[in-house]
Every structure is written in C-alpha cells, then in structure tokens.
Amino acid sequence: MANKDSRIKNNLISSLIYQVVLISLSFLLPRLYLENFGSEVNGVLSTIKQIFTYMCLLEAGVGLATTQALYKRIGEKDYHGASAVLSATNAYYIKTGVIYSAIVLVIAVVYAYLIPTSINSHVLFVIVILNAIPSLFSYFVQAKYRILMEVDGRKYVINNSETLLQLASNVGKILVLLLTDSLVLIQLVYCVIALVQLTYLYFYAKSRYKWLDLKAKPDFESISQKSSVLVHQLSGMVFNNTDVILISFLCDFKAVSIYAIYNIFFSQVQNFITSVVSSFTFALGQTFHADREKFDRTFNAYETLYVMATFIIYTLMAVFLLPLIQIYTKGIDDAEYTNTLLVLLFVIMNLIANSKLPVNGVIEYSGDFQKTRSYAIWEMVINITVSVVAILYMGICGAILGTVAALLYRGIVTIYYSNKKVLKRSQMSTYKIIITNGAVFALIMAIFYVDTFSNLSFFRLLLYGIIHSIWIVALYVFVNFAFNRSAFKTIFELCREKKKQ
C-alpha cells in the first residue's frame, strides 16, 4: 500500500509539473501562428490536428479494453495473465498500424490537393505525413507498454518524458518561427523529438517489466469488448473533436481559428484536470475489484470533490476568460475573437461533461461497455444532427449547442446506469452533488456575466481575479460541506488513515 501511495504522489506531482509547463507553452505557438500566418492558416492546422485526434479511434477501443483487463491481473500480480492480454493487444496494434498508414496517405492527398487552402499543396502533404510518424511508431512499437505503465501506476514516468517533450519541441518550434516561416521545419522539429521520447519510454518499459512476454499465447477473450469500448470512445471523440471539422465544412477556416483559440483555454484546463485525476484512477480501478466496500466509501468522496472542483474552475473561467481572450488576440484583426455567448456555451458544455465523468469511470471499472454502448451511439447521433442544424443557423455557437444537447442525454443515462446497476444506490447521490453546485454557479452568474470584466488590463484583471476567487471558492466549499457532510467525513477519515500508516 505504501508503494501504491508513493506512485500516486509521484503521479500527482509529475502531472502538476507537466500541466504547468504545457499550459505555459501552449499559448505561445497559436499566437505566433496568428501573427506570422493569419487566422486561416491557424484554422487549417487546427483542423488537421483534430483529424489526427480522430485517428486515435483506431486504437481507442483496444486501449481502454486492455486497461480494464489489466487492472485485476496487475493488482493480483498475475504476470502470466497480463502477458497474455498484452500479447493480444500487440497483435491488434500491428494490424491497426497498417490501416493507419493507408488512411494517413488518403488524408494527406485530400487535404493537400483536393481542399483549397492558402498553404502550398506539397507543404501541406509533408506536414500531414510528419504529423503521423510518431503515431505510427506508437502503434508498431510503444503503445502497449504505455498502457501497462499507466495501469501499474507509473504515469509519472510518462508525465516526466512528456514535460521534456513539450519543453524541447515548443522551444524548437518557437526558434524556427523566429528564424524562418517554414511550416515543414516546425513540424519536423516536433516529429524528431517525439520519436526520441517514445523510444525512451519503450526502453524504460522493457527494462522494468522483464516478466512481460509478448510471445505468450494471446488472450483475445480478455479484450473481446474492444468493439463496444470503441463505440464509447468514438462518442467521446465526437464530443471533443466534431465541432472543428463541422465548422471547417459548414463555415470557413477563420471560424475554425476562432473556435480553436477558445478551445485552447478550455482544453488545457480539462487536460490539467484529467492529468491530476489519472494520477490515482489506477488505484480506484484496482480497489473496485479488490474491495468494493472501500471503493464505495472512497468513490462518494471522490465524486463530491471532483464535481465541486470542476465547478469552481469553470465558474472562474466563465467570469474571467473573455477579457483574457481579448488580451491574447489583441492586434489580430482578420477575425472577430470576442464572443460572449461562445464563452458561456463552452463553460456549460464542460460543466455537463465533467459532472458525469466520475460515474462514467464506474462503467470503465466494471467493464460494462457492451451493456451501455447504445447510450454512446445515441449521443453521437444527437451531437452530429443537432450540431449540423444549429451551425447553419448560429455558426460556431451552434456546434457547442449540439454537443450540449448530446451531453444532457448521455449524462442522464450514465448517471442512471452507474448508480442503479453498478453501485446499487439511488441516482440522487449524484444529482444532489450536481444540483448543489449548479445552484452556486447560477447564483454567481446572476452576480457576474461573462463580459463583466471586459477590456481590462492584465494586471487589473489579475487583481479582480484574486479578490473574487477567494469568496467564490469559499462559497462552493461551504455549500458542499453543508449538503454533503458524509463525503467530507470520509475525506477526513482517509487522511487520518494515511497519517497512521
């Protein structure tokens, strides 16, 4: 247990460092792209990036199915069983890598030579190929080791290597941008450094997991739910990435650039939250199978803290983000980047998405992917249908509206299934937390609106942010403590247990 606690601590610290570095650097490049190339080029590059995020779907199903299958085996130190699972995963990844290569070539030809953009066709073709090379290496060589490291609680090793990757690649890209305007060279810098990072993780895993035998008889049954898992992952990808692609087809690349700039802020915050939570989810997954009584007790506290923390974060974004975007895009006049409704819709979308994530994790721990895949299918249908219609009438905001509609449906059915079918408790356990925090959010939005602090200087905005953040955080903590004391009692008990160890 002490070893597991140590890994959680290392994961958490490395996640925080990684996210601080990532957030600090990720805002520099888009601004430089806007200054050097304009909104259209930024929109094209953002679209390509989202397409490659979609391409991750080729491995998403088997990746999550493998994770779920490994929780029990690694927790019980069943290394033979773990080798059999990863042997099956390896076979799937090799087949997927071949398919991925073919799709990359098609995308490169279509975007470079069939869709008109201001970027030279040959240059765009090479950019697409360079984007794909690290993923190809991952499919054929490294991906299965990454899954094993995460399940074993070694996420901190991945985080540390990712931190170095972001530092080296972003500094390299910025130097290239300052010295030349070569988009190919910019992408080449990232490609080379990413390959170095993936190679390091490969050799680290080979050294630590000497018991791993990828030639063991593959246990294909253990990942038989990969198709059902893929449906869930596809739904998640539609939620995260459809908007950019639909906007690029139904609007234009300048509209994509506007969306992408807003999404930078929200995606970095979400990545930060996800990175911190992933530091200890391996322990929750193992506890679910080893000690259900302890899991139920811990999960209630985790769900309360998670939902409260995300409401605090996104409330602060609702109040203070618009003036930050105005400062960030100052001097960029080829597109209108100030959009109050877009900020509010982004906040609402992320609040709904995050409110269901803890109970969605319960489905992952239980492995009930097949029983719930119809939920994911309907979420995709609602998302795409409503988004297409809404974009035609509302532009960028319509894309978010479609996602909100889909998330409302998925949230309701996920809360029902996880609570009633898996946790065997009332749905009100989750709704009580959401409604409590939602009421606080509504109250604060009645006091402030998203443009209350518009057009302020950075230092005045920082001052107001510090002052108002104090009472907003205090209000959320007070209300949650008043309405869910049992969760806080569990938190205090867990803290006392840690001190005694």
Image (cartoon, rainbow, N blue to C red):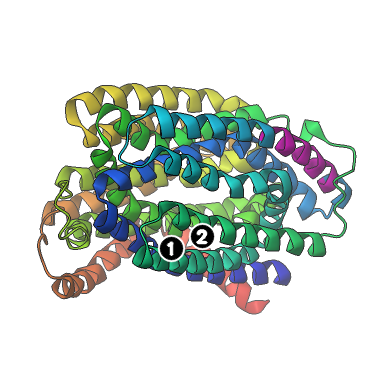
Please say whether residue 469 is one of the residues in the magenta stretch: no
Determine whether the residue tagged by mark 2 lies in a helix, strand or loop. Answer: helix
Q: Answer with left or right where residue 90 lies relative to residue 501.
A: right
Determine whether the residue tagged by mark 1 lies in a helix, strand or loop. Answer: helix
What residue sits 68% from the left and 53% below the top? 146
* Residue position for label 1: 173
- Work out whether 65 lies above or below 500: above
Badge 1: few (under 14), some or many (20 or more) residues near its Cα, within 10 Å?
some
Cα distance, mark 2 to mark 1? 7 Å
Residue 170, picture quadrant: bottom left
Residue 466, picture quadrant: bottom left
What residue sits 18% from the left and 63% below the top? 327
Q: Answer with left or right where residue 470 lies relative to residue 125.
A: left
Task: Specify the amino acid type for callout 1.
Answer: Lys
Residue 367 percent across, percent down from the top left: 65, 36
What residue sits 46% from the left and 52% below the top? 184
Asked whether 126 or 373 is in front, the reply is 126
Q: Is residue 423 visible?
A: no
Task: Specify the amino acid type for callout 2.
Answer: Val
Asked whether 379 or 191 is in front, the reply is 191
Q: Which residues are magenta?
A: 82-96
Name the dominant secondary structure of the magenta segment. helix
What residue sits 69% from the left and 52% below the top? 286
Asked whether 189 or 394 is in front, the reply is 189
Res 65 label: none
Residue 344 percent across, percent down from the top left: 21, 46
* Residue position for label 2: 189
Q: Earlier in the sequence, mark 2 or mark 1?
A: 1
Please say whether residue 87 is one of the residues in the magenta stretch: yes
Q: Is residue 338 visible?
A: yes
